[in-house]
């Protein structure tokens, strides 16, 4: 729905493992995810887009974190929704929105303070919790989109 607010969007399919794969199996595909993000940023640059942001969710945020930790010059900001597995934003210099639901997954909720602490020193970064919703922002999609839009508007 960001398109409805004037943003050009490009959806990238991140690597997916078998349905029974555990979270511990995913780091093996992070290099492939990084390559996909690099190619997407280059594609958008080729098309004349100078302001590029990443909006990712859950395991996609975990994969995007690996890319963002390299501080790619082409990416202006990152909206990370429900960053999982206790990851933080340590080392990420771009503005970050750490967005999660009040009833998110236990490991997302238990690492919220640690994620917020990792944003200190990055003045344009912020953490937002959407009340009354879960890991998928069920019944609060409009609030989720608004939070992302508001963040992107601030980091123009």
Image: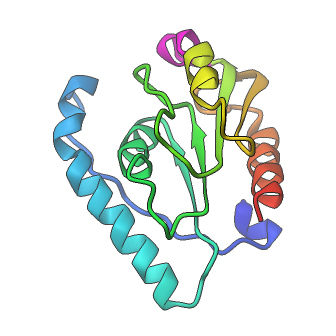
Q: Residue 50: x percent and y percent?
A: 61, 80
- For the residue pair 116 and 55, the one nearer the viewer reads as 116
Q: Is residue 136 left or right of residue 125?
A: left
Q: Residue furthest front?
A: 121
- For the residue pair 20 and 88, the one nearer the viewer reads as 88
Q: Residue at x 45, y 26 (%)?
A: 84
> Where is 129 relative to 110, above or below?
below
> Where is 99 relative to 31, above or below?
above
Q: Residue at x 55, y 16 (%)?
A: 114
**Quadrant of the image occupied by residue 87:** top left
Part of the protein shown in magenta: 104-111
Quadrant housing the N terminus = bottom right
Q: Residue 135: x percent and y percent?
A: 58, 26
Q: Is residue 120 left or right of residue 147?
A: left
Magenta: predominant secondary structure element?
A: helix
Q: Residue 139: x percent and y percent?
A: 75, 32
The answer to whether any part of residue 45 appears in the image is yes
The answer to whether any part of residue 18 appears in the image is no
Magenta segment includes 109: yes
């Amino acid at each position: 729905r960001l398109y409805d607010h004037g943003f050009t969007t490009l959806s990238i399919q991140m690597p997916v493992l078998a349905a029974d794969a555990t979270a511990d199996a995913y780091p093996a595909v992070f290099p492939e995810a990084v390559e996909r993000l690099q190619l997407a940023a280059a594609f958008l640059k080729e098309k004349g887009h100078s302001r590029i942001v990443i909006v990712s969710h859950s395991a996609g945020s975990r994969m995007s974190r690996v890319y963002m930790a390299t501080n790619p010059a082409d990416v202006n900001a990152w909206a990370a929704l429900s960053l999982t597995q206790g990851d933080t934003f340590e080392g990420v210099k771009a503005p970050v929105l750490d967005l999660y639901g009040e009833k998110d997954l236990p490991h997302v909720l238990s690492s919220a303070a640690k994620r917020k602490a990792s944003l200190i020193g990055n003045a344009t970064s912020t953490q937002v919790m959407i009340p009354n919703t879960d890991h998928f922002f069920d019944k609060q999609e409009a609030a989720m989109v608004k939070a992302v839009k508001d963040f992107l508007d601030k980091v123009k």
